[in-house]
Image (tube, rainbow, N blue to C red):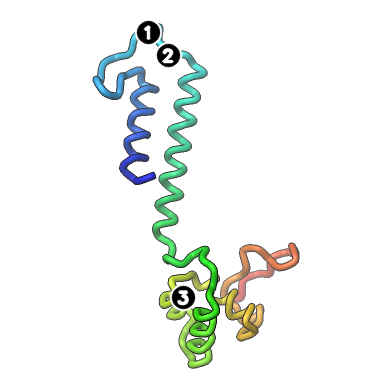
Amino acid sequence: MTKHNLRRAKQILRRLVEGIDPETGEELPKDTVLHRAEVIRALLTSVEAVEEVAQRASRRSQLPPSVGQRWSEDEERRLAEAFQAGQAVEILASNHGRTVNAIEARLESLGLITASQRTTHPRFPPNGGPEREAVS
């Protein structure tokens, strides 16, 4: 759903909550179902849901482009070579379109760094154990 569609949906829902026809701007008849408390609550819940979707989309648009994508063997090879050549983790993250956390996790899984060498901590600790504290 596009940003425009989300904005428009929110406008329509808000107008309905206000008892206004979103197309004509006229007040809706008092006997319409839209004046019932349970319907107004449902519409307000819908407005909140649309706002959450818009906020999630906004946050997602600020993430690097490769977040959540699988690592190919070629990408892993390029990562390992660049890291072993001394390239900084932040540069690797930028070059691969991933987060620093993802780069460190991949380097750890490739055996190129240890958990104690990471500057970030895993979002999902291995084996369901407690998360370790971030290294300062």
Q: Residue at x 60, y 78 (%)?
A: 118
Cα–Cα span, label 2 and label 1:
7 Å
Place of residue 83 in the rendered image (x, y in percent of width and height, measured from the top left): 51, 87
Query: Position of 94 compared to 83: left or right?
Result: left
Judge whether 55 appears above or below 86 on screen.
Answer: above
Neighbourhood count class around disc 1 (C-alpha, 10 Å): few under 14, some 14–19, many 20 upward: few
Q: Which residue is drawn at 50% across and 79% down?
A: 75
Tell me the kind of residue under disc 1: Lys
Judge whether 29 appears above or below 127 on screen.
Answer: above
Residue located beneath label 3 in the image: 93
Picture quadrant where residue 109 is located: bottom right
Residue located beneath label 2 in the image: 35
Q: Residue at x 30, y 19 (%)?
A: 21
Residue 136 visible in the shown view: no
Place of residue 3 in the rendered image (x, y in percent of width and height, measured from the top left): 34, 45
Local secondary structure at mark 1? loop
Neighbourhood count class around disc 2 (C-alpha, 10 Å): few under 14, some 14–19, many 20 upward: some
For the C terminus, the quadrant is: bottom right
